[in-house]
Amino acid sequence: MHASTRSRFLATLISLIAAVALALPLAAASSPVLAAHAAPAQTHASINCRLSATCTEVQDSEEVFGDGNYIGHDEPSTLFYSNRPGAGNQMVYTMKLPTDPKPGAGNVPLAGQSFNFQLHPAFWFGLAMCDTQSYPEQVSTCQPDSDSNIFDGQDAAHPIAKHPGTAFMEMQFYPPGWVAWPAGNSCDPNKWCAALNIDSLSEDPVNGTALNATCAAVTGLEYVNFAFITKSGHSQAPASPINATTATFTPDAAQDLFMNSGDTIVTSMHDTNHGLRIDIVDLTTHQAGSMTASASNGFGQVQYDPTGTSCNNIPYDFHPMYSTSSEHTRVPWAAHSYNVAFADETGHFESCNGPNIITPGGACPTGNTEYDGEPTDDNDVGCFPASSSTLIQAPGCIEGSGVTGFDSNPYHPIWPDGNTALHPTTIQFTSPVTGPGFNYSRMAFEADLPRIEANDLGGSCDRTTGTNCTRIPITDDGQPADFYPFFSIHKTRGGGGCTWLLGNDIPGLTTNDFGQNAQYGNLLFSTYLIFGGGGTTHLVTNNFRQVLNHNPCTNGFL
């Protein structure tokens, strides 16, 4: 595509998004995943980040959740950097949703088939957010959309202990065809849906305190504001973890935006007076939806109270934290180093094959086998029989299977590879653009394998030294996993356009795979606060990261 034509295309696309956004109404100024609590006339529910497959990965799970069972979050990611003002709070992506292979008779999978719900319970676009009631709790203000919030120890005047309170936004997309929300995470047998998630952490690392136990039992220490993207822009139920009900997590086809596999969609994210606004336009069906992270949509903070029994919701408009995006625009409690990013949540689904009957929501029974034929593990939880599925008759477990053993379905070569009779098509997405079509000048590949490897099998990866931390995770039998997904790009003939792909090399599409798993680079040691250390810090590795001095996939369109 010629440069002038490309500029006109981007301008037209951004104008379309703006027009649709203005047309959409603004909202007025027992699952292992959910913790449910009875309340008068309704049932309270909140996401349990100890067990949920879709929460932000914390930098120290033992500190937050103790040494018990914890669901880690394997998130291969692309990060995007730009020093252009607004790049940290205003961006547009285009994506083509992947499709699944056609199953056999009775919707029973054929031998060797895989489906999107098995590879990723969600994938998402991310952004750092202000939350004055979240970690590290030392300052009471956060200036939205400002690089004045960068406190990562870059000099003596900017210690990480004085970082404003931070949350992380994940604009998540959920695959169709398996167990329905809220027990599972499919909205429909055939259609995709999406939700705005904002994760916060209720800890004070300087003084070594955390949210009181009474309130933590309601919300969790890591808590989530959650709202499906709706066609009206109004939330269907309260988003805050204190006020949310089962209706918050139950899809409603009459209200929510549903999308077909293979649809081309545009996702726009920008700040408003009342919080971050997400707009999704389906260019295939001409449907659209939105959500604003506003108090009027039921978003709220959990008031930080480390003593007593109080549990108070503070209505809150969540705004993006930074003006730009770089290695310094971090979330100081998160394992990843990102701000503007695309990430795939993987590693969770484990097949639970017979012969013993599966109790919906329970563990995979002893005597059953996993995907690779090995006996079931005690971490195979959140399991459902094939009869619980909305479409594909595949028994399996959505929680736990990825955090120990690295032997679940996604660690085998069943990712997109061009064989669409057996495997899904790849996710295709463009690099973001900011403002009126400006590209992000640099990017990075990042995988948080050291963080979850350290949690695996007693902690084989030493995050202080990097010893035994590997780019291909080690399974419970001491061998490298069969496969780990990587990013590649597809450049159209002549280099006029470019999209990102995820999975394996895809004949006819992949033009550069950046060395496959070598793309994730070397161990990254980042500065984190020592819990209860009075503001002292240490260096820890949670990620492999490679930063490129350019963005190899600009001028994106589908």
Image: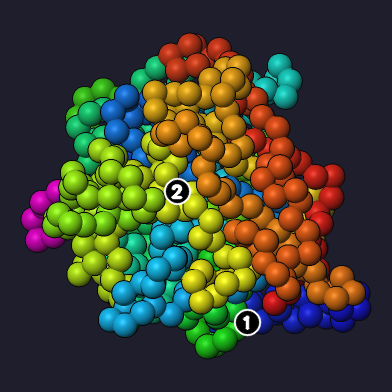
Which quadrant is home to the C terminus?
Answer: bottom right
Label 2 Cα neighbours within 10 Å, binned few <14 / some 14-19 / many ≥20:
many
x and y percentages locating residue 52 in the rendered image: 34, 47
Q: Residue furthest bottom?
A: 285
Q: Is residue 229 magenta?
A: no
Judge whether 146 appears above or below 185 on screen.
above
Q: Is residue 42 magenta?
A: yes
The residue lying at 21 percent from left, 25 percent from top is 308
Q: CA distance from mark 1 to mark 2?
A: 39 Å
The residue lying at 40 percent from left, 37 percent from top is 405
Which region is colored magenta?
Answer: 37-45
Disc 2 residue type? Gly
Task: Give the SS element for disc 1.
Answer: helix
The residue lying at 19 percent from left, 46 percent from top is 367
From the viewer's side, name the closer residue of 483 and 266. 483
Q: Which mark is residue 347?
A: 2
From the viewer's side, name the closer residue of 22 and 273. 22
Residue 261 seen in this snapshot: yes
x and y percentages locating residue 138 in the rendered image: 49, 24
> What residue would you read off at disc 1?
19
